[in-house]
Image (cartoon, rainbow, N blue to C red):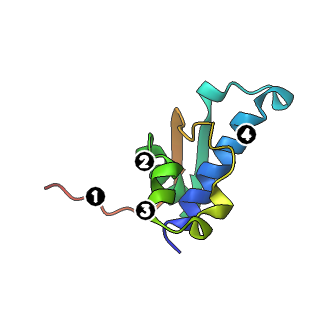
Amino acid sequence: MFPCASYDVKAAIRSFSARADPFHLEPLRLSITGASAGGNLTVLTAVTFGESIQVVAKQRKATEVQAAANHLDQSSDIQCGVSLDAAFLLMRR
């Protein structure tokens, strides 16, 4: 259910950032790509940069975000997101 999938993506990003050295990654230069539903998650992750899981945890019960609440000392921000074949309804207000 929404927004659990985006919490999982952000948790994976934090996990990779925490373990960057063995994977030879630069945590400040992470990007993600997704197709179809993964493309929607990619865009949602890209546009919710700066959103803190701690803020979410305060708003919800801790058990609801327990799975996504690892490596809270790491950022879940990405520098690039590539969405392939995702369905969007973009509206101008």
Which mark lies nearer to you, 1 or 2? 2
- Looking at marks 1 and 2 on the same chain, the residue that comes earlier in the sequence is marked by 2
Q: Amino acid at mark 2?
A: Thr
| Picture quadrant where residue 71 is located | top right
Which mark lies nearer to you, 4 or 1? 4
Q: CA distance from mark 3 to mark 2?
A: 16 Å
Q: CA distance from mark 4 to mark 1?
A: 31 Å
Which mark lies nearer to you, 3 or 2? 3
Q: Which dot marks residue 16?
A: 4
- Looking at marks 3 and 4 on the same chain, the residue that comes earlier in the sequence is marked by 4
The residue located at (17%, 55%) in the rendering is: 92
**Residue pointed to by mark 3:** 59
- Looking at marks 3 and 2 on the same chain, the residue that comes earlier in the sequence is marked by 2
Q: Which dot marks residue 48?
A: 2
Q: Position of residue 39 (x, y in %)?
A: 53, 56
Q: Amino acid at mark 1?
A: Leu
Q: Circle 1: is it few (<14), some (14-19), or many (20+) Cα within 10 Å? A: few
Q: Nearer the viewer, residue 25 or 68?
A: 68
